[in-house]
Amino acid sequence: MLELQNISFQVDAEGQDKEIIRDISLTIPDDKLVVITGPNGGGKSTLARLIIGIEKPTSGRILFDGEDITDLSITERAKKGLGFAFQQPVRFKGIQVFDLIKLATGKNISIVDACKYLAEVGLCAKDYIDREVNSSLSGGELKRIEIATVLAKASKMSVFDEPEAGIDLWSFQNLIEVFQRMREKISNSSILIISHQERILNIADEIIVIKDGSVVKRGSKSEILPELMGTSMAVPGCNKVESVREAKQDVKA
């Protein structure tokens, strides 16, 4: 279980402090797929970076399974069981897909074992296992390979920052199916996805809405999604109509 206790984050903007995250307190329980959504620039991706350790909060604490991890590095958090998939997956020239998956498991696995993770994300293993993780791979291929490494790592909590970014519609549909399979297999772990996409929101157990660095709504999919897909988010501080369709990022055709 992940706990955020009064988390705030500021940056220096032209000599003045700009608050990006404002006193957020959240609990992400085990055995749940939780989606964080909201208008662009609201602080969603910043919150993900704070959770996995790319950024350090200005104030507040982050607890993982009851342990304070606020001052731990990305590597230390990964060892504790936090996994992360970047919005834009990293390319590794000279490293083959098999090597990447083996590194993720932390074990000396066989090619057969590695191929099982590729199959989980809808890739034909024999076509990818020996390929380099470089520019020859499309955005959708890279995204699914990265998710295969997350599966291989078997993280206690897996965080995905806008996984739909930069991929085509066919790959996006496959991505939804991957998340659905992950959701079915959740056991003593959790999945946190940052997304605008309606189809990702639709597979969530819980939805958290963030606006202007603060949590403005949280609840089950049945409670939150119909309201989001209506005419207004109906949240405190909204001066105009804002819908998920207005906020969400278009998937490339």
Image (cartoon, helix red, strand yellow):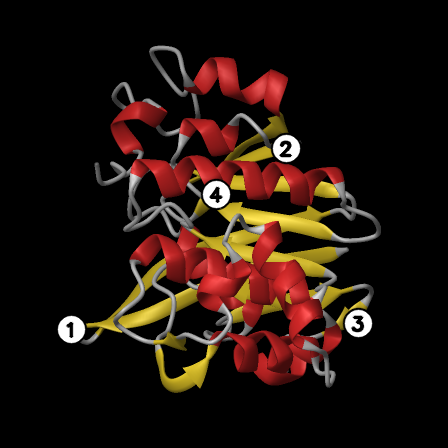
Specify whether residue 71 is in view: no
Kindly report the distance in space between the C-alpha atoms of the residues bearing marks 3 and 1: 36 Å
Say which residue appears at 48% left-offset and 72% top-offset. 58
Dividing the image into 4 quarters, which one contains the N terminus? bottom right
From the viewer's perspective, is residue 234 above or below residue 252? above
For discs 2 and 3, the disc positioned in front in the rendered view = 2
**Circle 1 crowding by C-alpha within 10 Å: few under 14, some 14–19, many from 20:** few
**Circle 3 crowding by C-alpha within 10 Å: few under 14, some 14–19, many from 20:** few
**Which residue is the site of mark 2?**
206
Q: Is residue 59 left or right of residue 153?
A: left
For discs 2 and 1, the disc positioned in front in the rendered view = 2
Sequence order check, earlier mark of 4 and 2: 4
Q: Which mark is drawn over residue 14?
A: 1
Contact (Cβ within 8 Å) of mark 4 with mark 1: no
Residue 43: image x %, image y %? 39, 52
From the viewer's perspective, is residue 207 above or below residue 41? above
Residue 64: image x %, image y %? 74, 65
**Which residue is the site of mark 4?**
175
Residue 76: image x %, image y %? 66, 83
Mark 2: amino acid: Glu
Residue 44: image x %, image y %? 42, 50
Kindly report the distance in space between the C-alpha atoms of the residues bearing marks 2 and 3: 24 Å
Sequence order check, earlier mark of 3 and 1: 1
Mark 3: amino acid: Glu
Q: Is residue 239 left or right of residue 57?
A: left
| Element type where label 2 sits in the image | strand
Contact (Cβ within 8 Å) of mark 4 with mark 2: no
